[in-house]
Amino acid sequence: MALAAIGTAAVERCRIPDAVGRPTWTVRTVHDGDTVTCHDTEGGTHKIRLLGIDAPEAAQTWGRESSDALSRKVAGRRVAVVSRGYDQHGRLLGTLWIDDRDINREMVAEGHAWVFGRIAPDPDLVEAESAARRERRGLWADSHAEEPSQWRAAHPRQP
């Protein structure tokens, strides 16, 4: 099986100078602003949670805009995936790259997602979020924007 999920041991600060030539998968479904499903070159299916970001939920303010933004960037496109293992739901945790574009960072920089991770968050993502907040981009235009984790706690899923 071709490996499109590339380990991050050699990747400093989640920056890849050039993703050209790396194995790629095709994005088949964008579930929301931080989760996609890709097909690999052998037809395998992989659900990927974008590493280091947390986008608004569909029912939350800015949820549809975030999902639409990710769709415009990656739907039907080939992406390189830099992986850091799996989350508790069995999703691959990864950063999506199109050429030299870090899609996870773009989502934060454009105000479509928060930085996710209280312990040692990626400094590039923190910088991107700070700039988006200062410039009131995307969800930051709303002075009452609520972090998805807080929104989920206030709106638990029903069994």
Image (cartoon, rainbow, N blue to C red):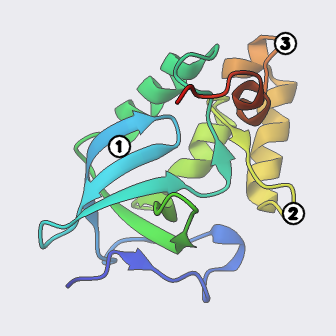
Q: Secondary structure at mark 2?
A: loop
Disc nearer the start of the sequence (3/1): 1
Residue 27: image x %, image y %? 28, 50
**Comparing labels 1 and 2, the label whose residue is closer to the camera:** 2
**Comparing labels 3 and 1, the label whose residue is closer to the camera:** 3
Q: Which residue is mark 2?
A: 119
Foreground of the two, 156 or 90: 156
Q: Secondary structure at mark 3?
A: loop
Left or right, 124 with respect to 50, comes to right
Q: Which mark is residue 144?
A: 3
From where the camera sits, is residue 102 visible?
Answer: no
Query: What crowding class fits label 1: few (fewer than 14 Cα within 10 Å), some (14-19), or many (20 or more)?
Result: many
Query: What crowding class fits label 3: few (fewer than 14 Cα within 10 Å), some (14-19), or many (20 or more)?
Result: few
Gap between marks 1 and 2, in whole Å? Answer: 28 Å
Gap between marks 2 and 3, in whole Å? Answer: 24 Å
Left or right, 85 with respect to 52, comes to left
Foreground of the two, 128 or 118: 118
Q: Quadrant of residue 62?
A: top right
* 136 is higher (above) or lower (below) than 131: above
Residue type at tag 2 = Ile
Residue type at tag 1 = Val
Which quadrant is home to the N terminus?
Answer: bottom left
Callouts 1 and 2 close, C-beta under 8 Å? no
Foreground of the two, 46 or 126: 46
Residue type at tag 3 = His
Please, which residue is most extreme toward the bottom here? 10
Query: What crowding class fits label 2: few (fewer than 14 Cα within 10 Å), some (14-19), or many (20 or more)?
Result: few
Residue 13: image x %, image y %? 72, 71
Q: Which residue is mark 1?
A: 74
Left or right, 134 with respect to 32, comes to right
Q: Residue at x 29, y 76 (%)?
A: 23
* 95 is higher (above) or lower (below) than 53: below
